[in-house]
Image (cartoon, coloured by chain):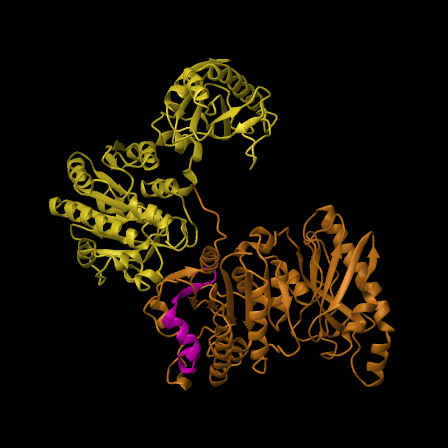
Chain colours: A orange, B yellow
Amino acid sequence: MLKRKVILAIADGVGDRPHPLLNHETPLEYAQTPNLDYLATRGITGMMNLISPGIPVGTDMGHLILFGYQPHHYPGRGPIEALGIGMTIKPGDVVLRCNFATVDEKGIVIDRRAGRIRRQTNLIAEAVSGMVIDGVEVYVKEATEHRAVLVLRGEGLSEKISDSDPKAPNDGVPYLEVEPLDASEESIRTASIVNRFLIQAHEILMHHPVNQERMEQGKLPANFILTRGAGRMAELEPIAEQFQIRGSCIAGESTVLGVAQLAGFKMITDSRMTGNIDTDIHLKAKLAIEQIAENDIVYVHMKAPDVKGHDNLPFEKAKAIELFDQMVGNILQMLQDDTYLALAADHSTPCEIGEHTGDPVPILIYGPSIRRDRVMAYNELDCAYGGLGHMSGTDFVRTLHGLMGIVKKQGN
Amino acid sequence: MLKRKVILAIADGVGDRPHPLLNHETPLEYAQTPNLDYLATRGITGMMNLISPGIPVGTDMGHLILFGYQPHHYPGRGPIEALGIGMTIKPGDVVLRCNFATVDEKGIVIDRRAGRIRRQTNLIAEAVSGMVIDGVEVYVKEATEHRAVLVLRGEGLSEKISDSDPKAPNDGVPYLEVEPLDASEESIRTASIVNRFLIQAHEILMHHPVNQERMEQGKLPANFILTRGAGRMAELEPIAEQFQIRGSCIAGESTVLGVAQLAGFKMITDSRMTGNIDTDIHLKAKLAIEQIAENDIVYVHMKAPDVKGHDNLPFEKAKAIELFDQMVGNILQMLQDDTYLALAADHSTPCEIGEHTGDPVPILIYGPSIRRDRVMAYNELDCAYGGLGHMSGTDFVRTLHGLMGIVKKQGN
């Protein structure tokens, strides 16, 4: 166990721009945040570009960096999604993102989302998971709504294959045969395995009780699996092993939890952490304090600010920020003297844009003997004058690791 | 001779954190530093991470960068130590760090430090230095206390060899035969040369008058040389040649002087420069002014702040800083109009940590037509608001070189 520990509270997508509905303040400026501002007054602040100024990052990439990886370690969206839904992914696995879909007897895609199926997809996934084709194990697991993940595990595989998903804006086109994208034996073989799987799965799903029931109710059957975005899981040393630290991540969102697992951190979740504004902040704060007692670093994540940014709801985003402030206040009340409390975001999601942008996000570190700067509020404008200056996500995380005493000295 | 010159005063390890004994000020904030603050008021300031935020660096690495090298030029600890004790090291030399040790007739290590021998190690080193084994010259020179450095010079050598030092926490294990760490002819040959040297040295040392005397006094004889950490000196173009400049370094510490020699700068030292708080600051200031008359850049180094940081003596660190302030004041009084006076540190050594940390250090440049910022004190908090911003050590040195007019224009 290290002498100094870190709790990093992440307000997903909190970075914003001045909004006309908020008197041209940002949601962070507009919200009442006595706890965040207390930390700013007693701590050191700055601005962070996760990768570099102007580059928007996804939640997965943002957290990959906040957990201690470099941007080039990004393993692709498929592996991240698989981890997010609790699949075990091994280096070398080929991972495809899928939709449960409806095709007719000629293979024409009637609906890419099988009537936006939401229920019993776990039964459908189970029915087609676990096959072995040409020595390769094939696993399927349902994700949210009509989505699923397909994992191929075995020797001699390649991710250089095309999509079976025609992704036509209006359906009514046939699904595509999967083709190798290069001339390698591995790609030819992998494409053939996926094609065989698609047909076998179709045969199983056509007669599956869930689909029988759906058809009886006049719903579209989930009788086909459309695949896209094949990626291969890289050999990534978990951050926890690399630095010989114990960590955990408290979150309601599966993507964040998946990346945490990749980093070798324990996933702490609960149905009361909803990934939205009704999340249980008292539970999160309590768990953060419990977890830091037996770990070196604890990440505690709140999704709601991002959700409200995507929906251009600046008042609700400010409300979500006030909840984040309360959560941080609860943690602060129970914080031990040996623990730094840091604030960050994975990216900006300005309400008026409704998407992730490359605007920098405010960062803050409070705790034992920290160099205090003159900034007294945690927001995008004040923290631009902070004593940490402007730094990359990697530099911010290394700064935290430095305070923990786990960065190797260069030279003697 | 260039039109503009630089004197860079380096306060070793001066960067710190707020300390409870100093009313939660850093030693730099707490100390009375009228001269440093005068320079801050008239100059431009900023913060520097020698390599990157959070990375602690050693004194050798820190100075390597301040003298103008990149971190990847670090030649390894052995070569640095050899340079520090005044040995001449040539590119291609294999350098090993050594202990004078005591072994019994069976080769069991009785004491890895030969009873912590401190005196007459120069005579012991001389007795085994200068051999030629298989065409390779072998040099030994004593370092501090029981330490020494071994240099192998000749064709066909390799640094890929194991240690003879068993480094057992409790002694009583035999010394290890040196083995090649790869299958190359060079490694096999180098290991064999070191093994032959160890035996020949042992035979000489067993009967050496210094050891005879020690045994008569009931002390352990320094009858063996344990080797470790073989490194090979890289081909490094001296900075002085690279930029066609003349430089010198005024310091009491051998490591700093060794790195200065590597960079092609003249080493200026004197027994009155002690490497501690009793160092002669007036002499250093006088030499700095004398040296800048005939050089383009002069480094003047003070070790005491680092020493007091390692010992967690915040008041004494503040005192050491006040001495540094006086030294800088003396230099300032005699400074010519064509010369910049710059301040920096090689790393932070916060008292409460007692070790080098990756916290950034304050930097300052004062001199002809410098862009003045609004900062009026030289310390870790004020300089975070400085006009130079936050930069790497390499960028800081290039900024100084730029002011000297020795940085090559890119494009036309």
Q: Nearer the viewer, residue A176 or B128?
A: B128
Q: Is residue A412 above or below residue A239?
A: above
Rendered residue at 82%/51% (across/down)? A135
Where's residue B263, x and y in %? Answer: 32, 34
Is residue B149 highlighted in magenta?
no
> What x and y, as percent, mark residue B41?
18, 59
From the viewer's perspective, tell me whether residue B30 is left or right of residue A24: left
**Would you say residue A45 sits in the magenta stretch?**
yes
Q: Which residues are magenta?
A: A27-52
A380, A156: nearer the viewer: A380
Residue drawn at 42 percent across, 83 percent down: A32
Quarter placement of the N terminus of chain B: top left
Q: Is residue B93 left or right of residue B289?
A: right
Q: Percent position (x, y) of residue A286?
A: 57, 74
Q: Is residue A11 left or right of residue B258?
A: right
Q: Quadrant of residue B300?
A: top left
Q: Is residue A401 above or below residue A7?
A: above
Is residue B387 in sight in this rendering?
Answer: no
Residue B151 visible in the picture: yes
Viewer-proximal residue, B396 or A181?
Answer: B396
Name which quarter of the figure residue A163 lies in.
bottom right
- The image shows residue B380, relative to residue A10, as above or below, that is above
x then y, percent, for residue A305 = 51, 77
A77 left or right, relative to A339? right
